[in-house]
Image: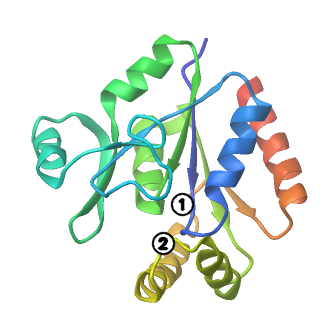
Amino acid sequence: MVKKAIIFSAPSGAGKSTIVKHCIERFPQLAFSISAASRAPRGSEQDGVEYYFLSVDEFRKRIDADEFVEWEQVYPGSYYGTLKSEVERLWAEGKAITFDVDVKGGYNLKKYFGPQALSVFIQAPSIEVLKQRLTSRNTDSAEAIATRLAKAGQEIEFAKGKFDYTLINDDLNKAYADIDKVLSDFLAE
């Protein structure tokens, strides 16, 4: 099997996790790459399931030891990254790796994997829709939501022309159909 990677990136609230979950259920050859994060778990998140939760010190030690394919300090003191060991684990299982990462992480992964990877940018139809989605989660303070919305504008601008495909997540069923076609074509190559 050719080693492949599918990279999903989006501003917070665009529906990235929902789309990724659908794709993993729809395509059995995909496996989710668990990212490392230096933040605390949210809600019912568990270490080794949604993320590998590391302290800031542990994350920095792993950066120094060159254990990441990519990493980013997304917010001050808040690191996210992809461990090389995770990539090797999934490819050893014969899976196509599916990444759910921030926009800069997605761009860096695409640079790293090149044509082995399909990079998908998921975009909500507007910043207002993002605000509604983030608010309805009930996981962040108003201040955190404002920070995420400001960052979303920057991410949307940064992503222009840097991803293989942009998926507008306005109607979820249409987004599912669109991404199913794109993934089917890429995985058949």
The three-letter code of the residue at mark 2 reads Phe
* 27 relative to 106 in the view: left or right: right
Decide: few, some or many residues near mark 2? Use Cα within 10 Å; few <14, some 14-19, many ≥20: few
Residue 120, image x, y percentages? 63, 52
Q: Answer yes or no: do the residues labelled 2 and 1 have beta carbons within 8 Å? A: yes
Residue that label 1 marks: 162
The residue located at (49%, 57%) in the rendering is: 43
Q: In which quarter of the image is the C terminus?
A: top right
Percent across and percent down for residue 13 are 60, 70
Q: Is residue 167 visible?
A: yes
Residue 113 percent coordinates (x, y): 45, 36
Question: Disc 2 and disc 1: Cα gap in Å?
Answer: 8 Å
Query: Furthest residue to the front?
Result: 44
- Residue at the spot x=32%, y=57% of the render? 40
Label 2 sits on a secondary structure element that is helix
Identify residue type, mark 1: Lys
Under circle 1, the secondary element is loop
For residue 63, what is the image quadrant?
A: top left
State which quadrant residue 170 falls in.
bottom right
- Residue 140 position in % (x across, y down): 47, 76
Q: Nearer the viewer, residue 45 or 125?
A: 45
Residue 129 higher or lower than 40, as above or below: below
Colour convention of the picture:
rainbow
The disc placed on residue 80 is none
Query: In the picture provided, is 174 more to the left or to the right than 99?
Result: right
Q: Residues within 10 Å of mark 1 (few under 14, many from 20)?
A: some
Please state if 145 lies on the left or on the right of 23 as rendered: left
Q: Mark 2 points at which residue?
A: 158
Identified at 45% across, 54% down, the residue is: 107
- Depth order, front residue of 98/187: 98
